[in-house]
Amino acid sequence: MNMENIHQVLSSFERALVAVDRVAAEKILAEYGPGFDPVNFVDTVIVQTLDNIGNAWAKGDVSLSQVYMSGKICESLVNSIMPSGGMKRIEHPPMAIAVLEDMHMLGKRIVYSVLKSKGYDIIDYSSMKTGELVGRVIRDGIRILLLSVLMLPSALHIKEVRKRLDNAGHEVKIIVGGAPFNFDAELWRETGADAMGRSASQAVEIINRLYERPQ
C-alpha cells in the first residue's frame, strides 16, 4: 500500500472515529486491514489515528467524549484483528504488563496483544496501584515489567515502583510507554525505567535488545 492510500485510510478512519461511527470504522478495517499484517495495521493506522484525535482534543477541535469513544471502538477492533498467540513460544524471563495508577487500557491492550501474537508469554496485571503492583511483581518473580500510563501523575509513580523494587532487592527491567513519555523525551530516565517505547513494535525491539535476542 502506497503513502497516498495510507493517508486516505488514516483520514477515513479518523472521520469514522470522531463521528463515533463503529460500523464505518469496521468497514475500513475490513477493506484495508488485509493489506497490512495485524501489528503494522495497529501501529500505522490505529495508533496514529488516536494520536491525531488526541492532538485535536488538545487544540479544542474535538470533545473528550469523542476521544473516549474513539478509544473504546479501537479496543474492540484490536481484539478482533490480533491473533491470540504465536505458533512458536519464545523463551524469556517472567514478564508482566500493567497500567499504573490509571484506568486507560488501550495502550496496554495493544502491546499485550502484539507480544502474545509474537509468541511471548506475558501476564496481564490490568490496572494496579503502586503498592499492589510491587507486591505482585516480587511474588511472581517478574523480571520484565511493562508499564503503560496516560497522564503525567501516573508516570511519576513509576519512580516509586523502582525505588520499592530496588529496596526489596528485586532485579527487574522496567519498560514504559504512554503519552507523558512522548511529550518529554527524558521523563523515562527520571522515573528510573530501563527503556521507553512509542509503539507496540518498539516494545518487542526493546525486549529483544535488553536480552540480546536476534530480531
Image (tube, rainbow, N blue to C red):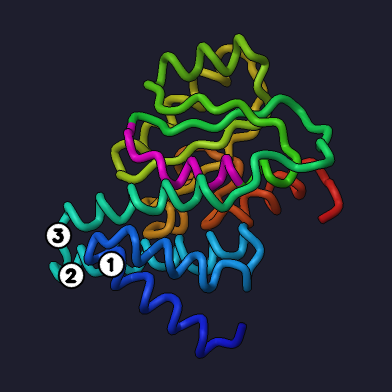
Vertical arrangement, residue 161 with respect to residue 70, above or below: above
Residue that label 2 marks? 59
Q: Write down the region rendered in magenta.
A: 102-113
**Secondary structure under badge 2?**
loop
Residue that label 3 marks? 63
Vertical arrangement, residue 4 with respect to residue 158, above or below: below
> Hey, what amino acid is under mark 3?
Ser
Residue 187, image x and y in percent? 43, 49
Q: CA distance from mark 2 to mark 1?
A: 6 Å
Q: Taken as a whole, is the magenta stretch helix, strand or loop?
A: helix
Task: Count numbered badges in the picture.
Answer: 3
Q: Which residue is most to the bottom?
A: 4
> Hey, what amino acid is under mark 1?
Asn
**Secondary structure under badge 1?**
helix
The residue lying at 60 percent from left, 49 percent from top is 82
Which quadrant: the N terminus?
bottom right
> Hey, what amino acid is under mark 2?
Lys
The residue lying at 45 percent from left, 77 percent from top is 9
> Do the residues bearing badges 2 and 1 touch, measured as CB atoms within 8 Å?
yes
Residue that label 1 marks? 55
204 displayed left or right of 26: right
Alpha-carbon neighbours of circle 3 within 10 Å: few (<14), some, or many (≥20)? some
191 part of magenta stretch: no
Q: Quadrant of residue 10?
A: bottom left
Of badges 2 and 3, the one in the foreground is 3
55 displayed left or right of 140: left
Comes first in the chain, label 1 or label 3: 1
